[in-house]
Image: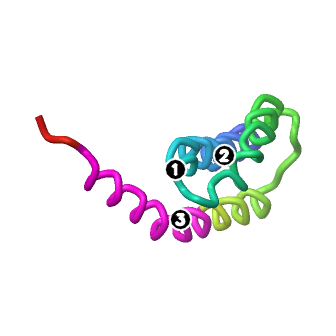
Amino acid sequence: MKESVLHFRLSNCLQTILELEGDLERLQLGHVLLSEFSQLREFMDRIEMVEIDEEDVRRIEAATANFLEELQGPLGLSREGEGSHRVVQ
């Protein structure tokens, strides 16, 4: 049971990152990260077979939080730029 909770938490981190794919495509350097998305998807397909422990999941959760924090600035600028190009009907 505990391992299924750990797998869920790990899966949640990876899914959060994968949901950023569209936003990252708009970033100038986003193409560097996009090559990793297919590997993340493949890993998610096999996630239940991976042995993990609480410490591993905590490190991945912290890394995911740091990644999201680092992207706030660039993604915010990207979204602001989009807003200035939208046509109001």
Marks 2 and 3 sit apart, C-alpha to C-alpha, by 15 Å
Characterize the local packing of mark 2: few (<14), some (14-19) or many (20 or more) Cα atoms within 10 angstroms: some
Q: Position of residue 38 (x, y in %)?
A: 76, 37
Q: Nearer the viewer, residue 39 or 34?
A: 34
- Looking at marks 2 and 1 on the same chain, the residue that comes earlier in the sequence is marked by 2
Task: Please state the total of marks drawn on the protein image.
Answer: 3
Label 3 SS? helix
Label 2 SS? helix
Label 1 SS? helix
Mark nearest the camera among 2 and 1 is: 1
Please give the label number shown on residue 26.
Answer: 1
Please give the label number shown on residue 14.
Answer: 2
Q: Position of residue 40 (x, y in %)?
A: 75, 41
**Within the magenta stretch, is there residue 75?**
yes
Marks 3 and 1 sit apart, C-alpha to C-alpha, by 12 Å
Marks 2 and 1 sit apart, C-alpha to C-alpha, by 20 Å
Q: Nearer the viewer, residue 73 or 9?
A: 73
Residue matched to label 3: 71
Q: Amino acid at mark 2?
A: Leu
Considering the whole magenta stretch, tell me its main secondary structure: helix
Q: As drawn, which residue projects farthest toward the left?
A: 89
Task: Say which residue appears at 72% left-offset and 42% top-offset.
Answer: 37
**Within the magenta stretch, is there residue 42?**
no
Q: Position of residue 72 (x, y in %)?
A: 46, 66
Magenta segment range? 65-86
Task: Say which residue appears at 80% left-offset and 40% top-offset.
Answer: 39
Q: Amino acid at mark 1?
A: Arg
Task: Say which residue appears at 64% left-offset and 67% top-offset.
Answer: 62
For the C terminus, the quadrant is top left
Task: Say which residue appears at 69% left-offset and 63% top-offset.
Answer: 58
- Looking at marks 2 and 3 on the same chain, the residue that comes earlier in the sequence is marked by 2
